[in-house]
Image (cartoon, rainbow, N blue to C red):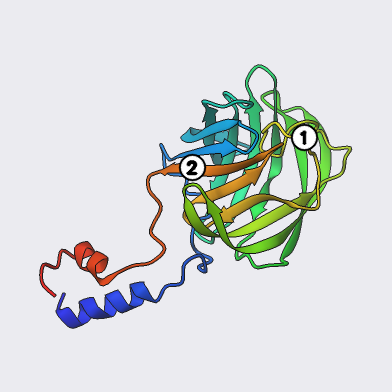
Amino acid sequence: MNRSSLSAVAICLLSIPVGSSSADPFLPLDQGNTWIYDGDGGAHEQLTVTGTIELFGQIATEITYSNSTDNEGLRNFWSADENGDVALFGFERPGEFGLVYDPPIPMVDAPLSLGKQWSHTFDIYEFPSMQYLQTVDIHFEVYEEGDVVVPFGTFYSYGIGQFMPASSPFQGVSLTGEVTADTEGAFVTDWWSGNLGRPKYWSGQLYELTDFNPPTPVETSTWGRVKATFAIDRP
């Protein structure tokens, strides 16, 4: 590759706006990815991608909670596609109960923008017996868009809230199975950022990201970084 071609590549990389691509995965599900959160009420969570599970003929990725104040051992089940969509298949609280959703709930309906709304109807099954419980309608709206500052950094994010009937089986837990004081609400419950997941979320208290492994991409690029990428050793 000649210098003019490398320069063109560098210009393209530098011109990509952070957080604007609908193709960015809103939940990176590589095996071993780990998110660590602290709650403003003193709680703590560590979430790790630990494997896969088959549900209703589809393969979902499992995220397991550890070192957790309220959700130790919780597993929830996800998928994320190349368009940026994120779907939630359900959860299990070992020794307590679990729920599975069919079809999976579109927690992120990409591309996102302030004010966007979407609705979803799904059947709820007890897990692991797969006994049918009921059918529920849920409504989502993007209430916020912009930079979110958490201990781990600043990330361009979309704040999404959800409405659900009080008669649903989510009493004391969220859709993801996390302990929460709220089962419905007209406020943001999850903030999503491309290539990262959730920099913060509400689940009884506000949890903010303190660490993510592997490191997230930097928000800006420099010519030095571009040169390093292509092993260029001269200006």
Question: How many numbered callouts?
Answer: 2
Residue 157 x %, y %: 57, 59
Q: Which residue appears farthest toward the bottom when viewing the image?
A: 4
Left or right, 52 with respect to 168, comes to: left
Residue 133 x %, y %: 81, 31
Marks 2, 1: nearer the viewer: 2
Residue 196 x %, y %: 48, 51
Which quarter of the picture shows residue 10? bottom left
Up-down: is 89 above or below 129?
below
Which quarter of the picture shows residue 166? top right
Residue at (16% x, 79% y) in the render: 3
Up-down: is 235 above or below 216?
below
- Give the labeled residue for mark 1: 181
Q: Residues within 10 Å of mark 1 (few under 14, many from 20)?
A: some
Which quarter of the picture shows residue 214? top left
Mark 1 residue element: loop
Kind of residue indicated by mark 1: Ala
Residue 64 x %, y %: 53, 31
Q: Which residue appears farthest toward the top when viewing the image?
A: 95
Residue at (47% x, 53% y) in the render: 153
Left or right, 30 with respect to 127, comes to: left
Left or right, 10 with respect to 233, comes to: right
- Give the labeled residue for mark 2: 210
Up-down: is 92 above or below 110?
above
Q: Tell me the quarter of the image containing the C terminus.
A: bottom left
Q: Earlier in the sequence, mark 2 or mark 1?
A: 1
Residue at (54% x, 40% y) in the render: 59
Kind of residue indicated by mark 2: Thr
Residue at (79% x, 38% y) in the render: 182
